[in-house]
Image: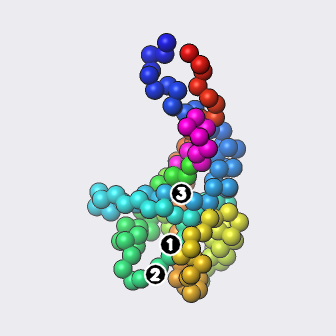
């Protein structure tokens, strides 16, 4: 019998190829922000171009909690998961500094193309009057980790 009673639930490290696949196909996750040691996490659509992760923030009002928690250069963490069953799942976290994407810069086109390629949009984006309602952010990954569980536990 295993010494670790929870071994059947733990995952194993994912390959870089599997991490990239999940980030390119999932398109949504949870982004965690922090201001003055006060954490804030929110579901978000994202795009991934193989190097950077792009986050679109919909600005429906001048008072936005996300805007209070994010600043150029601050560290954020994105968690993307794919859960197919109790013993069949993958989880990837991307941590790094975030930088605003200027709509007047050539990077804005890369931002929009990447979102168009693989982001999963919520209904709020469909209602957005224009791209002016969207703030663009880019995570420059400093740490990328993936774990997975893809097999049923052994019968005892």
Report whether residue 81 is seen.
Answer: yes
Q: Residue at x 67, y 76 (%)?
A: 109
**Image position of 5 with respect to 75: above or below:** above
Mark 1 vs 2: CB contact within 8 A: no
Rendered-image quadrant of the C terminus: top right
- Total count of labels: 3
Residue at 34% x, 57% y is 39
How many neighbours does mark 2 have within 10 angstroms: few (below 14), some (14-19), or many (20 or more)? some
Q: CA distance from mark 1 to mark 2?
A: 9 Å
Q: Nearer the viewer, mark 1 or mark 2?
A: 2
How far apart are the alpha carbons under marks 1 and 3?
A: 13 Å
Q: Which residue is mark 3?
A: 29
Picture coordinates of residue 30 (x, y %)?
Answer: 49, 57
**N-terminal of the two: label 1 or label 3?**
3
Q: What mark, if any, has residue 60 been given in the picture?
A: 2
Q: Nearer the viewer, residue 89 or 117?
A: 89
Of tags 1 and 3, the one toward the viewer is 3
Find out whether the residues at labels 2 and 3 contact each other: C-beta distance under 8 Å: no
Q: Range of the magenta residues?
A: 82-93
The residue indicated by pointer 1 is 57
- On whether residue 92 falls in the magenta region, the answer is yes
Residue 8 in percent (x, y) is at 52, 26
Identify the element where label 3 is drawn: strand
The crowd level at tag 1 (other Cα within 10 Å; few <14, some 14-19, many 20+) is: some
Residue 122 in the image, given as x and y percentages of width and height: 56, 70
């Amino acid at each position: 019998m295993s010494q670790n009673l929870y071994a059947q639930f733990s995952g194993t490290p994912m390959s870089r190829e599997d991490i990239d696949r999940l980030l390119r196909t999932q398109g949504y996750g949870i982004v965690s922000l922090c201001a003055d040691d006060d954490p804030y996490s929110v579901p978000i659509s994202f795009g991934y171009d193989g190097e950077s992760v792009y986050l679109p923030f919909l600005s429906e009002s001048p008072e936005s909690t996300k805007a209070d928690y994010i600043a150029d250069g601050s560290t954020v963490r994105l968690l993307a998961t794919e859960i197919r069953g109790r013993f069949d799942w993958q989880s990837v976290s991307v941590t790094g500094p975030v930088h605003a994407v200027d709509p007047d810069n050539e990077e804005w086109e890369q931002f929009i193309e990447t979102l168009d390629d693989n982001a999963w949009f919520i209904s709020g984006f469909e209602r957005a009057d224009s791209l002016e309602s969207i703030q663009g952010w880019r995570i420059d990954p400093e740490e990328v980790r993936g774990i997975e569980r893809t097999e049923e536990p052994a019968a005892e």
